Amino acid sequence: MRVWILGLVMVCGAAPAFGQAHDLPSAMPEVRAGESPEARGRRLLDEMVAALGGPAWLNRGTIYREGSTAAFFRGQPTGNVTRYVENTRLASATQPTDLTRIAFKTYRGMVAPGQKKDIFHLWTADNGYEYTYKGRTELPRPQVEDYLRRRRHSIEEVIRTWIHAPGVMIVSEGTTTQDRRIVDKVTILSANNDAVTIEIDQFTHLPLERSFEWRNEQFKDHDIDEEAYSDYHVYQGVQTPMNITRYRNGDMVDQEYFSKVKYGEPMAPELFDPAKLEVK
């Protein structure tokens, strides 16, 4: 008799829990009848672009950002924090690739408090330069190759170029979790077997991570480059991640935090001309 009563109590106590679970939104991905993995992958990318702002995101033209970056070594912070102002002109019909100019802020000292911008980095179509009061020098080739490689695999470049290229494959790879959120994985594979994987929040449709694999010629193996996006805010109709964290083979290498973002600001071509940029 005591056993029967205990069993009844357990069943009755579980009933509300079953009801609560039934009321929770399903974590299962949306499945559409007859939709192939490629069709689903393209649909997920379309939903991502719409969530980012649709035409407002696609037609930003320029990006102005103020922020700071913290460096890491073997996943641990080095203590170096750099503040900067970044100007980017996105690729267009007359400009085949993004151009970026970064001004680093340094402290003036005790005599004249405040910060000054006396070091610049300029990223052109195929090179990177550093400008100081001493003049212009080319940045180390490994640093340039790393930057250009990440730019070629950026979400902007994937949406702008990759998905329209002949022979491209776009495949939905199902769901996984990213930072305790359920995400849809979409891989874009080019005709020359280069690939980018984007993990998209299943509920907001915003990208949470972009990753790609590349061959390290120095060590004759493959490295994985990841970029995670968080702390989204809306600026001028565009969903903007205010924190970007980069990883190399699972180790954190740097974090960027943005304090100010503007889109569509006028930016003269001279700002990105290697021959005309100088430090005053």
Image (tube, rainbow, N blue to C red):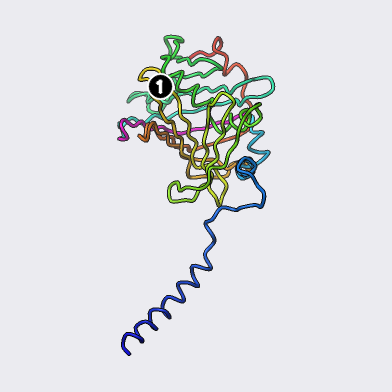
Q: Tell me which amino acid carries mark 1.
A: Asn
Name the chief secondary structure element in magenta.
Answer: strand
Q: Residue at x 43, y 81 (%)?
A: 12
- Of residues 225 and 274, the one nearer the viewer is 225
Q: Tell me, yes or no, whether the highlighted magenta stretch contains residue 64.
A: yes
Tell me if I can see residue 69 in this picture: yes
Q: Secondary structure at mark 1?
A: strand
| Observer-nearest of 225 and 51 | 225
Q: Position of residue 230 (x, y in %)?
A: 47, 43
- Residue 280 seen from this side: no
Q: Residue at x 49, y 33 (%)?
A: 66
Residue 7 drawn at (x, y percent): 37, 82
Highlighted range, magenta: 62-76
Q: Position of residue 207 (x, y in %)?
A: 53, 42
> Which residue carries the number 1 mark?
216
The picture quadrant where one finds residue 270 is: top right
173 shown above or below 116? below
